[in-house]
Image: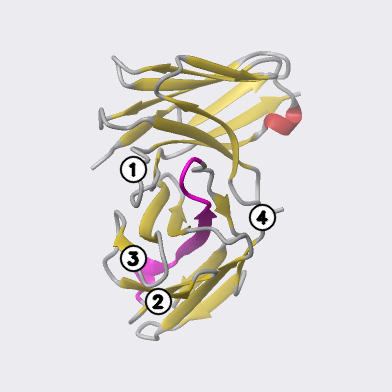
Amino acid sequence: DVKVTQSSRYLVKRTGEKVFLECVQDMDHENMFWYRQDPGLGLRLIYFSYDVKMKEKGDIPEGYSVSREKKERFSLILESASTNQTSMYLCASSLGGPSYEQYFGPGTRLTVT
Amino acid sequence: GENVEQHPSTLSVQEGDSAVIKCTYSDSASNYFPWYKQELGKRPQLIIDIRSNVGEKKDQRIAVTLNKTAKHFSLHITETQPEDSAVYFCAASSSNFGNEKLTFGTGTRLTIIP
């Protein structure tokens, strides 16, 4: 069974703080993704990575950065949190190659006050 | 880039009736179309997917159809049950190596009325 875990289920931060969201997968998947989920907007891709130390911008990368130092771990960084970054953040991973199924983590609900 | 539109945003059907959710995509290079189901408070999970070389795929009560010419695909759920209540997301991907990202639709909240 694929397991994708995220460091926190709920997080409250203040405007201007640096925020780290961590994601770990235990199935040796090549690809990892960060999405944010907002009502009426679906799942929007922030960044993804198809290899260690590789990263690609998604559709809404502004205000975010990522780090993938090890294959199993993919971190999302909010350099200076703002209130419009209050959202549900979902991490996902996929094996790559012939299998494109993405396995999602439980999500982190981030509130920026 | 790819743009995926999904309709309707909400759908209520009587238990036992059928439900249909429709999506359109913009990038003719897209060749992989999955559907994800997200139950309340849970993570999205893949329920069915289709590739562009296939026009229809069925798995028990759910089926997906694809019209590449018109660039639209649909999810069909027959004999709906209360456990089908969830938010459903369609997605599209060009599934090129090194760029296996999905573009999701905005979701459909399906409610099954007992």
Q: Is residue B66 above or below residue B87?
A: above
Q: Nearer the viewer, mark 2 or mark 3?
A: 3
**Percent from the top left, x then y, of residue B96?**
33, 43
Identify which amino acid the numbered label 1 is placed on: Asn
Q: Could you tell which of marks 3 and 4 lies nearer the N-terminus?
A: 4
Which segment is the magenta one? A82-98
- Mark carried by residue A77: 2
Question: Which subunit holds the residue at mark 4?
Answer: A
Query: In the image shown, does B33 or A64 lie closer to the viewer?
Result: B33
The image quarter containing residue B26 is top left
Callouts 2 and 4 close, C-beta under 8 Å: no
Query: What is the x, y in percent for residue A58?
Result: 31, 56
Quote the CA–CA distance across marks 1 and 3.
15 Å
- Is the residue under label 3 in contact with that under label 1 (CB below 8 Å)? no
Q: Nearer the viewer, mark 2 or mark 1?
A: 1
The image quadrant that residue A40 belongs to is: top left
